[in-house]
Image (cartoon, grey):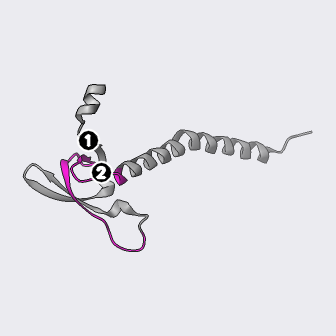
Amino acid sequence: MASNPILGSIFMYGAIFAIFYFVLIRPQSTQRKKHDEMVRTLKKGDEIVTTGGLVGEVIFIKEKGGEDKTNGMEDRVTIKSGDTRVVIERGRIARINRPVSASNVAAG
């Protein structure tokens, strides 16, 4: 009995998709969820680094109005960098550098 060549190619494409999913898509999705959660916890006084490399301290957060609160990445954040105030989108924050408290220094 000869096997169907279509089944072999379907299996091969399925295996390639599974490899791409577990190597590329799934880790990127979990990384994006961690970033979204980190940015949602942003508060006044946090030191941030933007995707463009700008470092500053958060002085004001303006949440975008409307009934759709799921897209909080478009909220505007005012930061102070040196003597300059800059308004950026919340989704453009790459990293938050929270000040280390004295209790964390003593414990570490």
Q: Which amino acid does label 2 sit on?
A: Ile
Q: Split into 4 quadrants, where in the image is the C terminus?
A: top left
Answer with left or right where residue 35 lies relative to residue 27. left
Q: Identify the disc placed on residue 48.
A: none
Q: Where is residue 95 in the image (x, y as percent from the top left)?
A: 30, 44
To which residue does mark 2 refer? Answer: 93
Q: What residue type is labelled 1?
A: Asn
Q: Where is residue 79 in the image (x, y as percent from the top left)?
A: 18, 55
Point 54% across, 38% down: residue: 23
Q: What element carries label 1?
A: strand
Q: Determine which quarter of the picture holds residue 31.
A: top left
Q: Split into 4 quadrants, where in the image is the N terminus?
A: top right
Numbered marks: total: 2
Instruction: Say whether residue 66 is magenta.
Output: yes
Answer with left or right where residue 22 lies relative to residue 104. right
Q: Which contiguous range is marked in magenta? A: 39-68
Q: Residues within 10 Å of mark 1 (few under 14, many from 20)?
A: few
Q: Determine which quarter of the picture holds residue 97.
A: top left
Point 37% across, 74% down: residue: 66
> Observer-nearest residue: 29 or 46?
46
Answer with left or right where residue 34 lies relative to residue 19. left
Tell which tag, 2 or 1, sits nearer the viewer.
1
To which residue does mark 1 refer? Answer: 97
